[in-house]
Structure formats: structure tokens, C-alpha cells
């Protein structure tokens, strides 16, 4: 298991990796008009300060892992995403990044997110991977498989990207989804091309949902 410092370095890397697409998604969700924002699965809080600055009110971070949460700055709470200590309709926006591959049971977590969202509130789920859809040339399938196996051994759903839109829909969200842009030359000319699909979702809380 990674140490808290190793996790902090990982969160920092991921924050930089998805920055451009994350900013586009947050603008689409209207974060500048949101008075209360939840950063669910905040980890060490690498994105929490930015969310707080961009919101019309404030952002609060939530994570089940107290070891890493202590690194975060700002408002934060340790809690289980399946049963959060917030009243109904507390938040205008719930933001996650690489969170749902760890979220189990998926429908339970989504229902709890929907509960704490206000009517017409928005869930932004960024960078949810699908290692089953990886494309590479020349083939390095064994390396990709090793990464997927390691994540799976830790409890991750390494194909969550292809499942999440349908789960959101049946939980009472109106969903738009897309794939994180990839740069085929990111590793330089002549280097192997590798593309792992990372899906992004902007999901509105549907008032007509059954949950």
C-alpha cells in the first residue's frame, strides 16, 4: 500500500495531468455560480483550494482515508461516501476525479451523491479509466495488463469508464459524457503510442428521478 507521501505525489501528478479538461468541465457545470461544492474523494486536497476559489461560496473536501485527508487544507470531513454526514440538497456541485473506480456499491454511492445534491445540481466525474479499452502500438499489452491487475488487486473496477453513464442514468441523473483528449506524441517521436480511455461525465440531478 502506498504511503501518504507517495499518495500525495500521485494526486499532484493526476491534478496536473487532467487540468485542462477538468477546467473545461467545471466551467460547463457553472462552478462560478455554485455556492456549495463538495470535492468527494479529495485525498490530500490537491484540487480543493482551486475549487474553493472558483466557487461562489465555498468548497469542502471529503474522503474516507484520514491518513491522506490530514494533508488537505481548507474545510474537510472524513466520511464514507455511502453515508455522508450532510443534509439533503446541501450541494450545488459534487466533483470527483478518478473516484468511481473505487466506489462500491456503485448504485449506493451514486444515490447518496444524488441525495446531497440540490435540485438541478451537478455531478462532475472526471478521469474514470477503462483499461479494457486501451490502444497501443507497438503492443505492450503485458504492461497494460500488469497495471490493470495491480489496480484490480487493490479493489478497483478497471472498466468503470464504460459502466458509469448507465449507472448514473438509472440512479436519476441526466448524463453527458466524453473522453479525455489524448496526445499521440506525448512520449516524443518514435516512442510507443499508448492511449487509455479516461471518461468524463457531467450529470445533472434529474427532478423526475425515482431515487
Image (tube, rainbow, N blue to C red):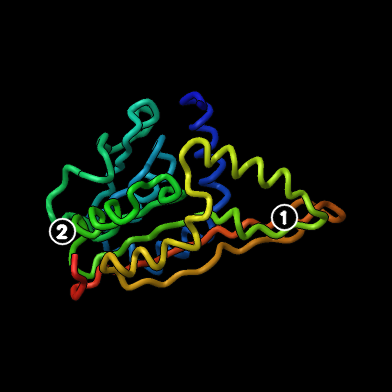
Location of residue 189 in the rendering, given as x and y in whole percent from the top left corner: 85, 56
State the SS at label 1: strand
Residue at (83% x, 51% y) in the render: 191
Binning the other alpha carbons within 10 Å of mark 2 as few (below 14), some (14 to 19) or many (20 upward) gives some
The residue that appears at 26% across and 68% down in the rendered structure is 172
Furthest residue toward bottom? 208
Mark sitting earlier along the chain (2/1): 2
* Depth check, front residue: 69 or 192: 192
Q: Secondary structure at mark 2?
A: loop
Quarter of the figure that contains the C terminus: bottom left
* Contact? badges 2 and 1 (CB < 8 Å): no
**Disc 1: CA contacts within 10 A as few (<14), some (14-19) or many (>=20):** many
Residue 142 horizontal/vertical position (percent): 73, 44
Residue 209 at x, y percent in the picture: 21, 71
Q: Is residue 75 left or right of residue 7?
A: left
Quadrant of the image occupied by residue 30: bottom left
Q: Image height check: is 5 above or below 45?
A: above
Q: Which is nearer the eye, 165 or 36?
A: 165
**Residue bearing the label numbered 1:** 194
- Residue 120, position in %: x, y? 23, 70
Q: Foreground residue, 100 or 76?
A: 100
Please indicate, yes or no, whether residue 54 appears anywhere in the rendered image: yes
Left or right: where 142 falls relative to 164: right
- Answer whether residue 52 is visible to the viewer in this image: no
**Spatial CA span between label 2 and label 1:** 41 Å
Q: Nearer the viewer, residue 68 or 169?
A: 169
Residue 115 horizontal side relative to residue 186, left or right: left
- Image depth: mark 2 or mark 1 in front: 1
Q: Residue at x 51, y 46 (%)?
A: 15
Q: Which residue is mark 2?
A: 89
Amino acid at each position: 500500500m502506498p504511503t501518504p507521501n507517495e499518495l500525495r505525489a500521485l494526486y499532484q501528478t493526476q491534478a496536473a495531468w487532467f487540468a485542462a479538461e477538468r477546467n473545461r468541465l467545471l466551467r460547463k457545470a457553472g462552478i462560478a455560480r455554485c455556492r456549495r461544492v463538495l470535492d468527494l474523494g479529495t485525498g490530500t486536497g490537491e484540487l480543493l483550494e482551486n475549487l474553493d476559489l472558483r466557487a461562489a461560496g465555498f468548497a469542502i473536501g471529503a474522503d474516507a482515508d484520514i491518513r491522506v485527508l490530514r494533508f488537505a487544507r481548507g474545510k474537510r470531513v472524513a466520511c464514507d461516501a455511502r453515508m455522508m454526514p450532510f443534509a439533503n440538497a446541501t450541494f450545488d456541485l459534487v466533483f470527483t476525479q478518478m473516484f468511481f473506480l473505487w466506489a462500491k456499491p456503485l448504485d449506493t454511492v451514486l444515490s447518496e451523491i444524488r441525495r446531497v445534491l440540490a435540485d438541478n445540481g451537478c455531478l462532475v466525474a472526471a478521469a474514470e479509466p477503462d483499461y479494457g479499452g486501451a490502444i497501443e502500438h507497438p503492443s505492450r499489452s503485458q504492461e497494460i495488463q500488469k497495471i490493470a491487475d495491480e489496480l484490480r488487486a487493490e479493489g478497483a473496477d478497471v472498466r468503470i469508464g464504460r459502466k458509469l453513464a448507465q449507472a448514473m442514468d438509472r440512479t436519476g441523473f441526466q448524463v453527458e459524457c466524453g473522453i479525455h483528449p489524448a496526445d499521440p506524441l506525448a512520449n516524443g517521436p518514435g516512442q510507443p503510442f499508448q492511449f487509455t480511455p479516461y471518461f468524463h461525465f457531467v450529470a445533472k440531478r434529474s427532478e423526475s428521478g425515482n431515487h
